[in-house]
């Protein structure tokens, strides 16, 4: 049923990666950049994920939908290392086993995450927020003694324009509007120059016009990065989705184009069932 | 460039630094040069008192660095303070030499009458100042490193961290009370004679210690400024505000917390070391959890999250304490207790915040004040 | 422009700061009074014991003023609260001597507070009267020890047990701090010198405020059930006593089986205890409220009237202050001035009546002579004197039973030295310059 | 509930009923033997005084009046004489003297009275009631230890034929500890013949055997040593030890040694049991002091530094109650428990409404504020009740111990407090699990806005919850007042331990609190013997710190995503 099942070449064994950021270039020779295979997680008996299989291609924009409690957020937790799965394997490219890495290593490795509720550092200015997110050496002694380099600053300006916050760069992030916070957070992801972006409900509580701009932003990002969007807003999903995955009770219910999944009786049943 | 970053960007800090510098210049003159009779004479009592406050301020600064900026509340900072103090105390004890009551050239008095035959191994080397100085930094530092490494690695945070730090200092207190420990038990270390060859009771020595404390405080302040204004400083603040976000931005939160904690512990140790020769005694009471909580209150009163706030707090609360214990000996705990409650309820930003609020209201009335 | 403003404000604040300083340092304005410092904790853990002594001092001073004061001047008490915080004791002492310029300080309870005060008193050449029984091993030119030294409390008590009750086995139980440590060391040495075997002495230390005595008491019970008469010599401090005696009582150890002789349990402590389980246990002091002499009855009436509460009691440290204060008054009258050196010279040899019918005398080692009384606790929390030394016992600064100190001698008149080594014939160290 | 009870102050049967016959025949015999023996005993004991006094023994009333005057040693002789008269009130008078309720007027001639209650007196000599008003100030007739043990011995001898088997048993045991001599052997053997209770008989056998250990006849000594096998009286052990070490006959030495071994093996077992009980008892204290926190801290997330002071308030309440009803000491605790609950509870509610309600979600701020409150409460206690400790008296039923055998006894106050602790725990558990308040509490603690949404008055629930926790603290205070000082510092001693218990057990989990309290208690008690009290405590703290590193959420963590962030 699943064309990607075991697509990953098992002969190459996982490299013992400490900090992938300085490891060798990511090996995506077999297409997918992210392999989630037979992953299960449970909290006191309740199975949040039930051997979930998911494969994300390089540069793909994937939407993930599903009713509440389908395990969307848990899936993100598992990929970003916040929650360690009970079983199953998660590989980043061919060789980087994410189960062995901690949050900050995964983040440095090139997987960025945006939370459901926008979380930016409210005490700091927009510029500083991006500054913090900037890719590079993030060890204590280094950040203590070194200032930003010239090109890092340029990168920040660049991103400031991408997310359209150039003029409010010195405002404290706390005073931004809801939408602006969302964009700022996405901007922070970009500063990490990640290979994969996990975006959790980006347009929740946005005005229509903000939603459109977000849609443009995300679609423009796809290609350079692989983008995984979790969203409830069907209209929004339709507007950006190339491929949609439906989660239900911790495993994939259906996968395919928006029309395919919407015509899928199982999906309909689940959604009406609510 | 750096000075700009450290100083002019925070007025309050500059003000406080200026004041400390001023007192460091004025007090010695007023104490030594000006005759007793003149109303401007500053008595030795005031000097030692101020010296004590300076040490407290340094301690408060250390706590504010981790509590105010990294949001780590340590209820055990008194422990590092006391350890630094003990290290200094041990040096001072060794300086007594054979001028002790029993005239034993090597053993401190309390060891003589507890029939200790020879000096315990951990007392060796403390006759040399450089060694003692090293220990003053190392002992609190290493303890903080081990403790912090364990705690932060297993993500013990907030309330839990506060409580186990309290347990830490409590355990140390009980341990140091034991006479078998070889630190003088309940009486601790006292009856010091001289430091670096200067008699500890001489006015000049007191001034010296006072100046040392003042300079230490100012340097520590600049060091803290350097940290909080660096990129690392921003990371630390963001850890306080959104820890997991920081993680997902690729920072190893643990190491940041750990190094900050260690640095803060070292500052506390230094404060303790300067404190002991000025008050002339160190005993396990300094480990008491209550002291550590009170310390937290100084910072809260002054205003956590602004380095100079901690200094202001330490001075104001302790000055108040001195006054109250003299004028209302029976009832002084009431105002003190009330202070704690009020500060937490109405002054979340502390005195500094209050001044700030007052300033803002003024500046809004007068637009041209705006920079 | 900005910087100038900043400097200006610094200047302003600097001025205000110096003002704050001078407010700290305002030296006492010259009134025509003699100032007496009272240095007792009114808050914190020691308040329980020390507050009473503060009141005692105020009463004594008031009384003296009624009699027309001293050298024609009124006495003015200066009360401060060191809040059971040892460094604060030192600070307050400095304040009393340097700021308030008091002529004498009456204060301290715990050894550690005295130790913390000592250097300051010596540096500023003040006078400290210390009213509590203590471990000895100290003698300062500026301190007068009006409480009992070990040889004025512990040793006589042990003698009584050994001779009158034929006690053969000994439990030395104490709180883990310097007073019990030293006292027990002295006692152990003393007992062994009297031929008590090693295994017949059990020494046990517990932390301050120890509240769970279950297995210690059952150990004592076991230790005592060997057929030989056993007694407990208790140097257990303050708060730990109540749970200790209750446990004794509940585990069925009565005073006839295993009597407990305490050195830190007096009328005041008993007034805070349900005395039932303590009946028959003993305490050794230099004064009991129950002693029936005119001086004592007068003192008690005066105290009850002053404090305005019929239920209050008097105790040994209060008597010590009574003696110390009167000695100071006499010495000042004798010297005709309150100047420290003059008083220090004048006070040695001064004799004043104590409350148990004798006259105590200030000795050259700055300790005093006292009677030693042994009392059994009664239901009403008072003591029934069962034995007392004939005549007064002179306080020893340095114990004859300790290695380090038995060669030491203190004499501030002949030798002007607190710890003169009789072997090497010189004044060891330099306590007071 | 009098089954096998030893009181700290020796208890005979109640003073107001003299010897009761259990059957006429034995009665006669008993009387005879008692007279015989007491006369004999008294004669021996009073040889010196016997000469001093006129051959015609002074009658009972005169002797009683003599008690009021003269030196302690003279009083001793008088006491013996009184015992010798074998007057029916002799026992009552002596007991009164022993318990310090024998008083004398200052007036002349001095009357000797027994104080039967506050300001109610009867004449010692004949038990007639007297009017307290026209007595003037009375003064207790003092005695000292020598006299006390003497009286106890005498009373014991009288009690040998008391009606109550337990009283007889105590009497025999008293004789054992006083040391048994030839005459007592005779008497004991005689009494044993018609002793009904087997326990008393065994005790008598032991007593006799104990005495026979010193007999000159080898056979007797050997049998005695046999007889004493497994007897747990400490005196017996001591005596056997002596025999085993230095008896002339090797066979007897061996026999004694065997008996000793059997005794020791028993003792070892009992010591283990003792230790466990000690541990549980300590645990129950920890439980009581921590359980209130388990609610305020565990369920509400408030770090209440004033918790200890709330206990203090409970303890003071007990004292106030006892002052208010000086004659109801026996029942004072039952009044104190609800009172303390209410008082502390109200104070708690006041604190919650006045301060804490503004600080929810900021646990560290609550820590500071409540610390301030604790300072204020302490100082308040000093100002109101004076810094001195207050004397809370133990009811009779709280003092003494449940004597399982001479080597193993459980003290009542500890036992009751252990049971009480468990009761409180389960009561609280029921409240949280069964009642609607409990439901609401859990709802609010889990999801405040949601609970609000479904119409729970969160603020009211908060107040109630905090009140509940504080009230429980008050109850703990009542229990503590039976163990330790009641003074301003009471709270300080327990606050840190309580927090440790809660954290160790796992916040928000009552069962965890129970388990952690008990295990900490037992661990502590098993460490103490070799580590010493102080070090044991330090070690425990260190272990706790390390444990929290391993399991940051305690023994029984709250699981699930809610707990994760």
Image (tube, coloured by chain):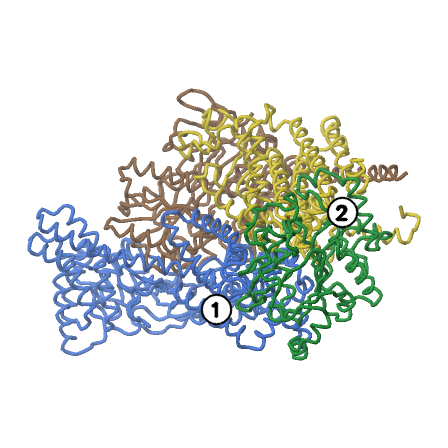
Chain colours: A green, B yellow, C brown, D blue
The quadrant the N terminus of chain D occupies is bottom left
Q: Is residue A188 left or right of residue C431?
A: right
Q: Position of residue D480 (x, y in %)?
A: 47, 61
User: What secondary structure is marked by label 2?
Assistant: helix
Residue B332 appears in the figure? no
Determine the residue located farthest toward the top in the rendered image: C425
Relative image position of residue D194 (x, y in whole percent): 14, 72
In the picture of the structure, the residue carrying the numbered disc 2 is A131
Give the farthest residue toward the right.
B368
Say left or right for B211 vs D537: right
At label 2, counting other C-alpha atoms closer than 10 Å, the crowd grade (few under 14, some 14-19, many 20 or more) is many
Q: Is residue C297 above or below residue A228?
A: above
Determine which residue is flagged by label 1: D425
* Residue drawn at point x = 61 percent, y = 49 percent: B74
Q: Name the residue rendered at 55%, 34% in the picture.
A: B87
The residue nearer to you, when weighing C421 against B351, is B351
Q: Is residue D226 left or right of residue B175?
A: left
The crowd level at tag 1 (other Cα within 10 Å; few <14, some 14-19, many 20+) is many
Instruction: Where is residue A2? Give x, y as percent.
Output: 61, 66
User: Which of pointers 1 and 2 indicates the residue nearer the eye?
Assistant: 2
Residue B329 at what x, y percent from top left?
63, 49
Element under disc 1 = helix
Q: Is residue B48 above or below residue B361?
A: above
Task: Tell me the quarter of the image containing the C terminus of chain D.
Answer: bottom right
Judge whether B205 appears above or below A257 on screen: above
Q: Chain of mark 1?
A: D
Q: CA distance from mark 1 to mark 2?
A: 54 Å
Front one among D439 and D479: D439
Res D258 label = none
């Amino acid at each position: 049923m699943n064309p990607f099942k075991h697509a990953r070449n098992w002969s190459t064994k996982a490299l013992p990666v400490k900090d992938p950021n300085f490891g060798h270039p990511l090996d995506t020779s077999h297409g997918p950049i992210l392999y989630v295979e037979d992953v299960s997680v449970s909290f006191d008996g309740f199975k949040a994920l039930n051997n979930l299989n998911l494969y994300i291609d390089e540069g793909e924009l994937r939407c993930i939908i599903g009713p509440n409690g389908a395990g969307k957020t848990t899936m993100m937790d598992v990929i970003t290392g916040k929650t360690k799965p009970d079983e199953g394997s998660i590989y980043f490219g061919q060789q980087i086993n994410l189960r062995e890495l901690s949050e900050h290593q995964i983040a440095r490795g090139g997987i960025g995450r945006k939370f459901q509720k926008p979380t930016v550092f409210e005490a700091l200015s927009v510029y500083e927020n991006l500054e913090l997110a900037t890719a590079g050496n993030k060890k204590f002694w280094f950040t203590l003694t070194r200032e930003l380099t010239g090109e890092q600053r340029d990168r920040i300006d660049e991103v400031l324009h991408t997310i359209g916050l150039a003029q409010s760069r010195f405002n404290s992030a706390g005073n931004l509007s809801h939408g602006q916070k969302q964009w700022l957070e996405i901007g922070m992801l970009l500063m990490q120059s990640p290979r994969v972006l996990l975006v959790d409900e980006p347009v929740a509580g946005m005005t229509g016009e903000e939603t459109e701009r977000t849609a443009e932003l995300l679609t423009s990002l796809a290609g350079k990065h692989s983008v995984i969007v979790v969203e409830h807003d069907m209209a929004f999903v339709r507007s950006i989705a190339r491929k949609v995955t439906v989660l239900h009770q911790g495993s994939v219910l259906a996968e395919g184009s928006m029309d395919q999944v919407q015509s899928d009786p199982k999906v309909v049943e689940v959604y009406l069932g609510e | 460039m750096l000075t700009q970053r450290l100083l002019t960007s925070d007025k309050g800090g500059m003000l406080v630094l200026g004041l400390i510098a001023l007192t460091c210049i004025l007090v010695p003159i007023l104490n030594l040069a000006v005759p007793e009779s003149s109303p401007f004479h500053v008595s030795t009592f005031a000097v030692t008192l101020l010296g004590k406050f300076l040490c407290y301020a340094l301690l408060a600064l250390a706590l504010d660095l981790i509590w105010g900026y990294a949001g780590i509340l340590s209820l055990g900072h008194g422990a590092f303070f006391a350890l630094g103090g003990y290290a200094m105390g041990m040096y001072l004890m060794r300086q007594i030499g054979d001028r002790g009551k029993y005239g034993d050239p090597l053993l401190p008095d309390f060891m003589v009458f507890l029939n200790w035959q020879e000096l315990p191994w951990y007392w060796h080397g403390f006759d040399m100042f450089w060694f003692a100085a090293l220990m003053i930094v190392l002992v609190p530092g290493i303890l903080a490193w081990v403790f912090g490494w364990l705690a932060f690695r297993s993500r013990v945070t907030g309330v839990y961290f506060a409580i186990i730090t309290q347990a830490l200092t409590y355990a140390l207190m009980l341990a140091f009370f034991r006479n078998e420990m070889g630190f003088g038990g309940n009486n601790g270390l006292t009856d010091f004679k001289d430091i670096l060859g200067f008699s500890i009771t001489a006015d000049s020595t007191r001034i010296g210690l006072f100046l040392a404390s003042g300079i230490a405080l100012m340097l520590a302040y600049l060091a803290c400024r350097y940290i909080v204004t660096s990129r690392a400083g921003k990371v630390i603040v963001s850890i306080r505000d959104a820890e997991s976000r920081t993680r997902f931005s690729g920072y190893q939160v643990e190491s940041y917390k750990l190094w900050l904690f260690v640095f803060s512990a070292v500052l506390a140790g230094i404060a303790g070391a300067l404190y002991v020769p000025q008050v002339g005694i160190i005993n396990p009471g300094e480990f008491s959890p209550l002291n550590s909580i009170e310390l937290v209150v100084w910072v809260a009163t002054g205003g956590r999250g602004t380095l100079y706030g901690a200094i202001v707090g330490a001075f104001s609360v302790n000055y108040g304490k001195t006054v109250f214990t003299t004028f209302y000996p029976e009832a002084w705990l009431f105002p003190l207790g009330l202070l704690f409650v009020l500060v937490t309820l109405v002054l979340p930003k502390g005195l500094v915040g209050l001044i700030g609020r007052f300033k803002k209201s003024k500046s809004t009335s007068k637009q041209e004040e705006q920079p | 422009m900005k910087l100038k403003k900043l400097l200006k404000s610094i200047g302003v604040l600097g001025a205000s700061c110096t003002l704050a300083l001078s407010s700290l340092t305002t030296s006492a304005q010259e009134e025509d009074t003699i100032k007496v410092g009272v240095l007792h904790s009114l808050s914190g853990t020691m308040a329980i014991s020390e507050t009473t002594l503060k009141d005692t001092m105020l009463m004594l001073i008031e009384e003296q003023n009624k009699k027309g004061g001293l050298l024609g001047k009124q006495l003015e008490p200066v009360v401060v609260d060191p809040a059971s915080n040892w460094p604060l004791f030192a600070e307050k002492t400095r304040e009393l001597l340097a700021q308030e310029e008091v002529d004498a300080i009456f204060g301290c309870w715990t050894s550690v507070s005295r130790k913390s005060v000592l250097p300051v008193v010596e540096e500023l050449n003040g006078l400290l009267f210390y009213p509590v029984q203590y471990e000895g091993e100290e003698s300062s030119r500026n301190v007068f020890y009006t409480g009992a030294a070990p040889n004025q409390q512990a040793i006589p008590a042990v003698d009584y047990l050994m001779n009158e009750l034929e006690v053969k086995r000994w439990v030395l139980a104490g709180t883990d701090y310097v007073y019990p440590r030293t006292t027990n060391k002295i006692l152990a040495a003393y007992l062994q010198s009297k031929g008590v075997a090693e295994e017949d002495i059990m020494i046990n230390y517990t932390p301050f405020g120890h509240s769970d005595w279950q297995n210690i008491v059952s150990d004592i019970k076991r230790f005592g059930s060997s057929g030989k008469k056993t007694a407990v010599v208790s140097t257990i401090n303050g708060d730990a006593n109540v749970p200790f005696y209750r446990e004794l009582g509940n585990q069925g150890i009565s005073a006839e089986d295993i009597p407990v002789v305490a050195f830190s349990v007096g009328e005041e402590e008993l007034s805070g205890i349900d005395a039932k389980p303590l009946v028959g246990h003993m305490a050794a002091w230099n004064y009991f409220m129950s002693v029936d002499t005119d001086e004592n009855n007068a003192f008690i009436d005066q105290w009850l009237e002053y404090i305005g509460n019929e239920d209050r009691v008097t105790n040994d440290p209060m008597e010590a202050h009574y003696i110390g204060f009167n000695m100071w008054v006499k010495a000042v009258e004798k010297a005709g001035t309150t100047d420290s050196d003059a008083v220090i010279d004048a006070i040695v040899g001064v004799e004043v009546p104590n409350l148990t019918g004798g006259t105590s005398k200030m000795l050259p080692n700055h300790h005093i002579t006292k009677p030693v009384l042994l009392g059994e606790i009664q239901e009403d929390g008072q003591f029934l004197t069962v034995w007392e030394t004939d005549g007064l016992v002179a306080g020893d600064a340095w114990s004859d039973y300790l290695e380090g100190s038995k060669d030491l001698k203190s004499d501030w008149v002949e030798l002007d030295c607190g710890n003169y080594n009789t072997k090497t014939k010189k004044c060891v160290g330099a306590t007071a310059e | 509930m009098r089954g096998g009870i030893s009181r700290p102050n020796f208890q005979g049967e109640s003073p107001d009923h003299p010897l009761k016959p259990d059957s006429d025949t034995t009665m006669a015999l008993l009387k005879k033997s008692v007279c015989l023996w007491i006369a004999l005993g008294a004669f021996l004991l009073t040889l010196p005084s016997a000469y001093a006094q006129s051959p015609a023994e002074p009658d009972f009333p005169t002797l009683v009046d003599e008690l009021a005057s003269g030196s302690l040693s003279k009083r001793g002789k008088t006491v013996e004489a009184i015992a010798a008269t074998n007057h029916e009130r002799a026992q009552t008078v002596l007991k009164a003297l022993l318990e310090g309720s024998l008083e004398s007027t200052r007036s002349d001639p001095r009357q000797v009275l027994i104080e039967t209650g506050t300001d109610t007196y009867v004449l010692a000599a004949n038990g007639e009631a007297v009017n307290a008003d026209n007595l003037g100030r009375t003064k207790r007739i003092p005695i000292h230890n020598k006299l006390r043990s003497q009286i106890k011995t005498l009373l014991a001898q009288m009690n040998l034929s008391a009606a109550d088997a337990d009283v007889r048993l105590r009497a025999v045991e008293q004789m054992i500890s006083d040391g048994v001599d030839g005459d007592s052997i005779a008497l004991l053997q005689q009494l044993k013949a018609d002793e009904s209770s087997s326990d008393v008989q065994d005790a008598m056998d032991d007593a006799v055997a104990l005495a026979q250990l010193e007999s000159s006849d080898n056979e007797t000594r050997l049998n005695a040593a046999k007889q004493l096998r497994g007897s747990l009286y400490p005196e017996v052990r001591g005596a056997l030890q002596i025999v085993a070490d230095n008896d002339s006959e090797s066979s007897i030495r061996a026999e004694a040694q065997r008996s000793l071994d059997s005794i020791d093996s028993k003792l070892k077992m009992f010591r283990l049991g003792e230790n466990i009980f000690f541990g549980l008892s300590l645990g129950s204290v920890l439980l009581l002091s921590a359980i209130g926190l388990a609610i305020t801290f565990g369920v509400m997330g408030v770090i209440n530094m004033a918790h200890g002071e709330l206990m203090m308030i409970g303890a003071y309440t007990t004292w106030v109650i006892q002052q208010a009803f000086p004659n109801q000491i026996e029942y004072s605790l039952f009044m104190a428990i609800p009172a303390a609950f209410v008082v502390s509870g109200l104070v708690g509610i006041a604190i919650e409404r006045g301060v804490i309600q503004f600080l929810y979600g900021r646990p560290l701020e609550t820590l500071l504020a409540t610390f301030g409150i604790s300072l204020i409460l302490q100082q308040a206690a000093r100002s109101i009740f004076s810094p001195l400790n207050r004397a809370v008296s133990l009811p009779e039923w709280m003092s003494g111990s449940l004597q399982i055998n001479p080597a193993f006894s459980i003290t009542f106050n500890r036992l009751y407090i252990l049971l009480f602790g468990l009761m409180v725990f389960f009561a609280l558990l029921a409240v949280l699990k069964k009642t609607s308040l409990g439901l609401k509490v859990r709802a609010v603690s889990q999801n405040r806005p949601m609970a609000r949404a479904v119409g729970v008055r969160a603020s009211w629930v908060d107040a109630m919850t905090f009140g509940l926790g504080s009230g429980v603290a008050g109850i703990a205070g009542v229990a503590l007042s039976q163990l330790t000082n009641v003074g301003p510092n009471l709270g300080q001693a327990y606050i840190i331990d309580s927090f440790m218990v809660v954290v160790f057990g796992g916040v928000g989990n009552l069962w965890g609190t129970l388990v952690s309290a008990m295990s900490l208690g037992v661990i502590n008690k098993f460490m103490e013997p070799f580590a010493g009290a102080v070090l044991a405590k330090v070690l425990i703290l260190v272990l706790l710190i390390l444990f929290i590193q391993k399991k940051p959420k305690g023994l029984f963590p709250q699981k699930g995503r809610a707990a994760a962030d």
